[in-house]
Every structure is written in C-alpha cells, then in structure tokens.
Image (cartoon, rainbow, N blue to C red):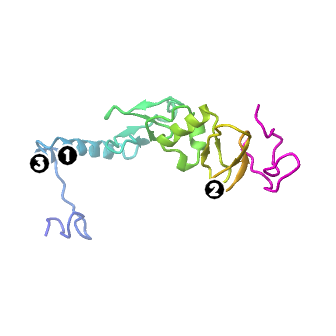
Amino acid sequence: MAAGGGGGAGGGRQGCRLKFSREAVLATLEGQTKEVQLWEQLEVGYALRNLPRIFCPHAACSCPLLLPATGEQPLPSNQPSTCPACGKGFCPRCRIPGWHKGYSCAQYQALPPEERNPDTAAVLRLSAARSWQRCPQCRSLVERAGGCNYIRCRCGRQFCYQCGLPYLSSKPSPTNLHGTQACRCPLWHG
C-alpha cells in the first residue's frame, strides 16, 4: 500500500497529501531528460493555471502559452505563430497545428468541422484553384473533364457544374435532355 492513504496512484479516497520539494523530484528524475521536460511543463502549467493561456496544439508538445492580458496587443490575426518550446508553427486563434494557408481565420472557422483538417484544407485550396465543384448533396469534389455543365454525381444527385445548384427534375425538357435546371446557366460552357 502506498504511503499517504494507499489505493494506488490516486492515493485512494483520501488522496495523497505528501508534498515533495522540486529538488527531490528533479533528483529522482536525474538522467531522464524527457521526464524532466514533462515535469517542467507541468510546473509551468501549474504556475499559469489562473492566467489566460492556450496550449501548443502539437500533440508531442502541448506547452502552455500565455495569452495577451486585457488591454495588451491581441493575438495576431491571420498570421501563424511559432511555439517557443517545440519550434513548430500553429494558428493561435484557431488553435491548430500548422497554418490554414489560403484561408483567413474567419474563413477557416466557417468551414464545417470535418473540413478543418490541414490535409483536407489543402485539397480544398487545390479544388478552388482548379475550379472544381462540390456535389450539393454528398459534398464530394467533382472535376469536369469536358462536355456540358450537367453533372450526375456518384451519389445520384444531378447538378449544374457551373453554379452548383441541383437539378429540379430529371425529366428531359425541350431545351435540356438531362432535366430541368434550377439555374439559368447555359448547358454548354463556352
């Protein structure tokens, strides 16, 4: 049974009330560089517990970082920051590793949560640069290689490639053998 009440790491129902000096902890961790770094991060986190702070969003780091005090210069808008502990970049406003290149913080926050992954954001930037369209039903990316503006997605939704609006009907009309468009875009893109 552990000293201070027993019951394992948490000290049982009573909780461990033993206090160790910083020197004793560091002496116990001597030669264990990673554990010393973790201890120091825990110390800093405890010292900053009542101050406004964020944590480095990189999983291997998580260093606590002070936020600017009220009245000081606010967090930088639309520019990345670098964690002083791990040296990796992140967005302090969106609190994500890396940077949402091609998007302002407001544009990035407006994305659905499933599209906020940095890899997904990179594909979306590429799709915008190449003028790909998204299916209005399943949100899959569609690239038109040629032909008319009519698209039938793999999910079955029919839509106009030029504007993205779904077709109202799949019944052929006198001007469009694919059905009735919800838009006034030309069937053939010049």
Q: Is residue 173 magenta?
A: yes
Q: Residue at x 18, y 69 (%)?
A: 6
| Labels 2 and 1: the sequence-earlier one | 1
Q: CA distance from mark 3 to mark 2?
A: 61 Å
Residue 28's disc number: 3
Would you say residue 106 is visible in this rendering? no
Which residues fall within the magenta stretch? 163-190
- Residue 150, by quadrant, is top right
Q: CA distance from mark 3 to mark 1?
A: 10 Å
Magenta-span inclusion, residue 117: no
Local crowd size for mark 3, using a 10 Å CA cut-off: few (<14), some (14–19), many (≥20): few
Q: For the residue marked with disc 1, what is the amino acid? A: Glu
Query: The N terminus is located in which quarter?
Result: bottom left
Rendered view: 72 above or below 139:
above
Q: Secondary structure at mark 2?
A: loop
How many discs mark residues in the rendered view? 3
**Cβ atoms at labels 3 and 1 below 8 Å apart:** no
The amino acid type of the residue labelled 2 equals Cys
**Which residue is at a point 46% across and 30% down the rendered structure image?**
80
- Relative to 49, is 172 on the left or the right? right
Q: Which residue is mark 1?
A: 35
Is 162 situated left or right of 84 in this image? right
First of labels 3, 1 by sequence position: 3
| Residue indicated by mark 2 | 155
Whether residue 53 is visible: yes
Q: Earlier in the sequence, mark 3 or mark 2?
A: 3
